[in-house]
């Protein structure tokens, strides 16, 4: 298995531009999570999906952020318009429903991350 | 809600020395506990997890952690570190039955030769 695949690995854009980050979860995983990592705030959960349905988006900073999961093998996180304070590393992670081989706990597998710089 | 405090933001140690990275959590309900490691420019990888049973949990790369319910701690230890252990280490907590992991701020482990 290739693991969780994220693209692009690096993105540099100017303030006001639209940014789309992409994620392909591990095949068969039914949970998908988007996290943001910054020096100031650490790792923050933005949103997560179960079976392609958004379950909790309480971590999404504001309306400029949106996430979709049109099918089990693809998710996007979009920022429009982007601002310098959105600069961060964005991680996607996936997992199986607890109980399916991981002892009842939700064990996340992370992608390598997308480093976003907004100038 | 659950929260995690990692008491040290940076821990420098010499190669082959023992190390302990401290983690305390706060929760009013039963939880699962995890340690993840992040090598430079990579995503997080699971080191070990505590679900139930024995309070001493062994993970990959010679790491282990001990769950202490009375002290609400889950400290990570390794008896002898190697240069390759240089990384950032994250403690995380998840309420039993829930899917959301809450991470600590991370501890940067630096190994000096």
Image: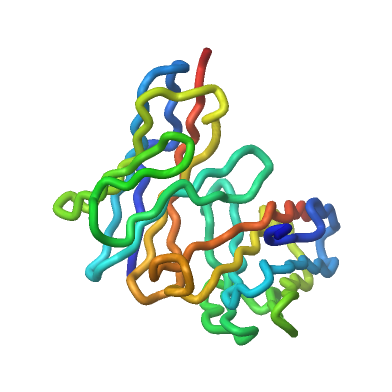
Looking at the image, what colour scheme do you see?
Answer: rainbow
Q: Quadrant of the N terminus of chain A?
A: bottom right
Image spot of residue B28 (x, y percent): 22, 69
Image spot of residue A25 (x, y percent): 68, 68
Considering depth in this image, is A76 or A88 the residue closer to the camera? A76
Image-based side of B52 in relation to A49, left or right? left
Residue at 48%, 36% (x, y): give it. Answer: B61
Considering depth in this image, is B51 or A69 the residue closer to the camera? B51
Image-based side of A13 in relation to B81, left or right? right
Q: Is residue A54 above or below residue A65?
A: below
Residue at 27%, 46% (x, y): give it. Answer: B56
Query: Could one spot residue A78 in this view of the protein?
Result: yes
Image-based side of A40 in relation to B43, left or right? left
Image spot of residue B34 (x, y percent): 40, 54
Kindly give the residue lying farthest to the front in the view shown.
Answer: A101
Image-based side of B57 in relation to A59, left or right? left
Query: Could one spot residue A119 in this view of the protein?
Result: no
Considering depth in this image, is A94 or A82 the residue closer to the camera? A94
Q: Quadrant of residue A21?
A: bottom right
Kindly give the residue lying farthest to the top in the view shown.
Answer: B113
Count of labels shown? 0
Residue at 60%, 39% (x, y): give it. Answer: B39
Image spot of residue B110 (x, y percent): 51, 26
Q: Is residue B106 above or below residue B13?
A: below
Considering depth in this image, is B81 or B93 the residue closer to the camera? B81
Residue at 61%, 57% (x, y): give it. Answer: A110
Q: Is residue B76 above or below residue A114?
A: above
């Amino acid at each position: 298995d290739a693991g969780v695949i994220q693209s692009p690995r690096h993105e540099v854009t100017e303030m006001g531009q639209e940014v789309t980050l992409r994620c392909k979860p591990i095949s068969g995983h039914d949970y998908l999570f988007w996290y943001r990592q910054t020096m100031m705030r650490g790792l923050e959960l933005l949103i997560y999906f179960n079976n392609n349905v958004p379950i909790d988006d309480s971590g999404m900073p504001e309306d400029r952020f949106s996430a979709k999961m049109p099918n089990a093998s693809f998710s996007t996180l979009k920022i429009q318009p982007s601002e310098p304070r959105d600069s961060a590393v964005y991680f996607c992670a996936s997992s199986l429903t607890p109980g399916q081989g991981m002892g009842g706990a939700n064990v996340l597998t992370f992608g390598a991350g997308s480093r976003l710089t907004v100038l | 809600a659950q929260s995690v405090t990692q008491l040290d933001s940076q821990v420098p140690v010499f190669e082959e020395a023992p190390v302990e990275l401290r983690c305390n959590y706060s929760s009013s309900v039963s939880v699962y506990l995890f340690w993840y490691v992040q090598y430079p420019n990579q995503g997080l990888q699971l080191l070990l997890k505590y679900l139930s049973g024995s309070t001493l949990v062994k993970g990959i790369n010679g790491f282990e952690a001990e769950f202490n319910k009375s002290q609400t701690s889950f400290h990570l230890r390794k008896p002898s570190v190697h240069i390759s252990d240089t990384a950032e280490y994250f403690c995380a907590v998840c309420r039993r039955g829930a899917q959301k992991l809450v991470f600590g701020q991370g501890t940067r482990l630096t190994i000096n030769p």
